Image (cartoon, rainbow, N blue to C red):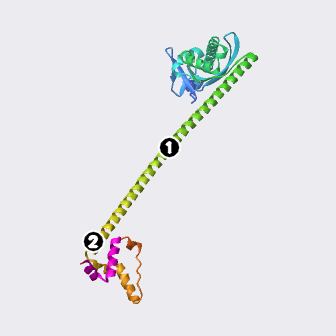
Amino acid sequence: MEIIGICIVVIAAGLFLYEYRLRKPDQWILGERRGTYLLRKSRVFARHFSLALPKKSHSMQQVVDASAKGNIEIKVKLAMTVAPDLDRLQELIRIGGWSPQAVEVAAKELGTVVHSLVGEFTERHELEDLSSETIDAYLRQKIGISRELMGLSVIAFTVQSFEAVDPKIAEAVRQQESARILEQTELLNQKARITAAQAKLKADEEIALLESGLQLKTFELKKVALDKEAEIAQRQADYEVKRHATRLAIDREELELLKSNPELLILTPQAARLAEASQSLKNARTIVALSPGDIAQGSEWLEMFRACLQSGGPGDLKKKDG
């Protein structure tokens, strides 16, 4: 009995090791339940009842032979990268089958669909209207069919090249493209020159406005300075006028005082100079020179002073007047 039990355990262990596998980190484990495919998350799975799908994308390049309008043969090179869409497992298994290569198989089917889409698009357009950009834009609009019908997610898609099969036509297309590029380059250069000229003109206008504003500001400052100088000059002139008027008033008062009191002439600076001269030169004739400032006081003052001197003193002047 013990031997039978050991044999059963060995057979069970062998069956377990033969059937069950550990899920690798780069694998998705798919299972089936009631006709629906689902993603298993357990680390251990039965290999005959599960599908180990690699967690990797699939890249492929494709050369599509098509024709443009007028039956002109063309060649389009495509490149795309796809990966399984876990939300569309039913479509992926239906197209790719229950196999670890399901993604590759579905990608080939997608390539066939893309081939037909390219042919459908190019046949409706002239060769001059076709380009890598136009074909790429059209295919990107239609590529959503891969997710809906084939369970694939397109990671990258590009049209690598587009050219006519006939070398002469291909060369003509290249020449047209070169001419177009040169024309666009020349247009861009001319636009750049126009933009630069407009920018320079605008800068010159702004500089001229700033310089004009600076000149106006300078004139305003000069005007203010001239106004200040004129005001100072006017004040100075007013001060001189007032000073001369005061001086004249004082001179008039002195003259009036001397008229009223002729004896005060002896106290004047002129009489003092005369007395000093007479003391130093008693036997000489004294000559007294009057400065222009003294003469400026008026002829009336001089007449009074002369009369005082001729009469010999203020007392004689009073007698003569009497």
Q: Residue furthest top?
A: 70
Is-magenta flag for residue 173?
Answer: no
Pinpoint residue 188: horizontal percent, then vertical percent: 62, 29
Q: Residue furthest left?
A: 322
Quadrant location of the C terminus?
A: bottom left
Task: Give the mark count.
Answer: 2
Closer to us: 13 or 301: 301
Pinpoint residue 180: horizontal percent, then vertical percent: 67, 23
Closer to us: 127 or 290: 290
Q: Which residue is mark 1?
A: 212
Chief secondary structure of the magenta portion:
helix
Residue 236's place in the image compared with 12, above or below, is below
Closer to us: 320 or 172: 320
Pinpoint residue 297: horizontal percent, then vertical percent: 35, 71
Closer to us: 4 or 302: 302
The residue lying at 37 percent from left, 82 percent from top is 274
Q: Residue furthest right?
A: 168
Q: Is residue 9 visible?
A: no
Quadrant housing residue 81: top right
Marking on residue 42: none
Q: Which residue is mark 2?
A: 256
The residue lying at 48 percent from left, 44 percent from top is 213
SS under mark 1: helix
Specify the amino acid type for callout 1: Ser
Q: Earlier in the sequence, mark 1 or mark 2?
A: 1
Quadrant housing residue 153: top right
Q: Which residues are magenta?
A: 298-321
Residue 51's place in the image compared with 256, above or below, is above
The residue lying at 34 percent from left, 74 percent from top is 303
Specify the amino acid type for callout 2: Glu
Q: Is residue 171 visible?
A: yes
SS under mark 2: helix
